[in-house]
Image: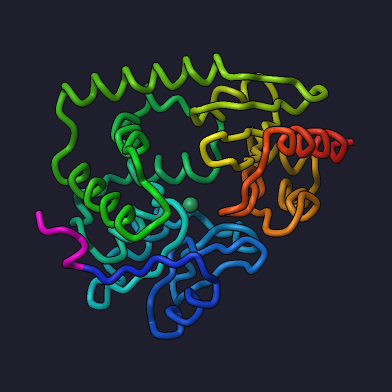
Amino acid sequence: MQSAQDLIDLVYTDHFSEAMALSALGYEPVECAYGGNGSVLGDLAMDHHGAESWREGVALRACRDHYGARKKDPRFVVTGTPDADAVLAVIALSGLVPASQIPQAFYELVNLHDVDPVPLDLLSMPYGEELLYFQQLERLRRDRPSFFRAIDEMRRLLLGGLQPKQRTTIRRREEHRIQMAEESFLEHIGERVLLVESRVWGFDRWYRKAPFVVSYSQRASSITIGCRSMVVAEQMLGEGGLLRVFPQMGHGWGGRESIGGSPRGVVFSFDQAREVAEKLEALLG
Ligand SMILES: [Mn+2]
């Protein structure tokens, strides 16, 4: 398989102004949300964060509505971590994998998992192991090489599927993650907010204990705020859900109605995460 690096033109940037400039040159931005600055959108409006969170996820729209739309002009601008949603969107828009090799159930699962991390039990869902395989890729960073690696891994997955041995490993690792998430440091802040410090991503597990979770990642020194679902977030905080909370936490905080967090590249402490949890509990009234 030829590497995506030789097939598409993809620029990574952490800067809103650079993404704007590239978009003006005809590059298609994919999930280019820059916190307080907002999103950079191209012709296909490929984002669904902040002010754009009313839009459907990008992989869903790319696969269902815009497959191959950038095949003749595969230029993209991206930012953040190469998640399954953004990566699958780039693949579909540029036609890097035949449409027939991207099952509807797979892109719908990627979307569901991306937009509302309600406790989805991937181990028991069709294509759950495939998505877990991608989730389990290591050392995916916020840079261009990571995007290309993630794109090529996703292409291999779609074209070749998983071997039985890989499925066994994936399941074992996922079971281990679940165990780690349950054994994390957990502290109830009031009745509705759970403060967590963990080395693993465990929102799906923590939402079983409280509707709102404030999680501190020691590795990234960052804080994430999540709510079990968009419906619950809007019920308890009003229209917009957590979008009403982020501006109160400081400059650069942002995300979607049901999940978001501290600005990229800013270092936070666990005590600050506790303050955020207490502030959130107070905002819930
Ligand atoms: Mn997304």
Q: Can residue 78 be spotted in the picture?
A: yes
Where does residue 109 sit, x and y in percent of width and height? 40, 40
Where does residue 38 sit, x and y in percent of width and height? 62, 67
In the displayed structure image, the side of residue 140 where residue 49 appears, left or right = right
Q: Going 60% across and 24% down the picture, which residue do you hit? A: 206
In magenta stretch: residue 6? yes
In magenta stretch: residue 161? no
Q: Quadrant of the N terminus?
A: bottom left
Farthest-out residue, bottom: 25
Where does residue 285 sit, x and y in percent of width and height? 90, 36
In the displayed structure image, the side of residue 36 where residue 125 appears, left or right = left
In the displayed structure image, the side of residue 12 where residue 17 appears, left or right = right
Q: Look at the picture and state if 242 lies above or below 138.
A: below
Q: Look at the picture and state if 70 lies above or below 156.
A: below
Where does residue 36 sit, x and y in percent of width and height? 67, 64
Number of marks in the rendered image? 0
- Which region shows up in magenta? 1-7
Q: Going 57% across and 19% down the picture, which residue do you hit? A: 184
Q: Going 76% across and 54% down the picture, which residue do you hit? A: 250
Q: Nearer the viewer, residue 92 or 7?
A: 7
Q: Can residue 105 be spotted in the picture?
A: no
In the displayed structure image, the side of residue 68 where residue 272 appears, left or right = right
Residue 129: quarter of image: top left
